[in-house]
Amino acid sequence: MPTFIGIDVSKRTLDVASRGAELKLRRVDNDETGHTTLIEALRSLGEITLVVLEATGGYEVPVAAALAAEKISVAIVNPRQARDFAKGVGKLAKNDQIDAGVLAHFAEVVRPAAQPMPDEQQLQLTALVTRRRQFVDMRSMEKNRRALAKSSSSLVRSSIDDHIEYLDHRVAELDRELDDLIKRTPVWKENDDLLSDVPGIGTVTTRTLAALLPELGKLNRRQVAALVGIAPFARDSGEAKGRRTIFGGRAAVRGVLYMATLTAITHNPLIAAHYARLLAAGKNAKVALVACMRKLLTVVNAMLRDRARWNPALVETNGLDS
């Protein structure tokens, strides 16, 4: 009989529930000792069909990696999906053990695809890119405060300036470390060389795509657009035709792609022509910009898929936009 496991993850504990086999273990600590205890308990059940966890701000990564290292299939799902499923089956109450049971039921009914866990290098790249983004966000906030601190004391202004200088230093330091990491990894270096030729795509974009969108080049254009959150979803019912909207996806990737597209509609002939056509057809400027984001993402996805260099003359004719 197939066995499905649901794990509700918190900072300190893991609540566990099963479907298809009885599991006596109900809660373990979210640390290496707890992970070992959990794996031993799961092994006592025989072959595990699937383990499902919710994404929990990174607290789920160590246990997911430990399970994957033991060749146990793991799927990390969006909490919204699990909560909507719970409402759909009438589970309105909520606590850690109930949530674990809902995840086990979700695993049994929906059977989300198991995901390969990122290796150590991928985790390192993701951590560096994420930390750089945090520093840049902090620097932007400090610069905004500096602009409003003209009437403040010199001590306040000096404190802000010192912090901005510190953040500049830290961002530059992370840029050097990211450069070294990219150059030491042949696949990332090749991808970086391919994408850096595309007008509008800079080093921040290539690193973000490598770190936060490792599926790029492995999915079709519709799948990768949905993953980033720039695929338009229908809102139709009967004769009513709702307005298409984008929803969900990876916000950090979408933000970087947005900035790249702002540059591309000016400096990339292919994207600029696409943007002009959409405006001439009466599209709202923001709608046209999102469509250009999707176009740019589709092109770079096809370039990595086909290992092709940037050539705007060939994009439309050899399928690089499909």
Image: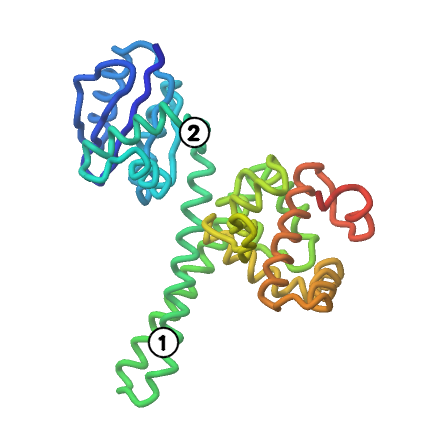
Eyeballing the image, is 296 above or below 14?
A: below
**75 lies above or below 46:** below
Mark 1 vs mark 2: in front: 2
Residue hosting label 1: 161
Q: Position of residue 317 (x, y in %)?
A: 82, 45
Residue type (three-letter) at the residue carrying disc 1? Asp
| Front residue of 163 and 314 | 314
Give the quadrant of residue 90: top left
Q: State the image quarter where residue 216 is shown.
A: top right
User: Circle 2 sits on which residue?
Assistant: 112
Counting from the top left corner in percent of width and height, residue 154 is at 29, 86
Q: Which numbered disc, 1 or 2, marks the residue that appears first in the sequence?
A: 2
Q: Is residue 306 left or right of residue 37?
A: right
Whether residue 204 is visible to the viewer of this picture, yes or no, is no
Where's residue 153, x and y in %?
A: 26, 87
Give the class, few, some or many, for how many residues have Cα within 10 Å of label 1's Cα (few <14, many ≥20). some
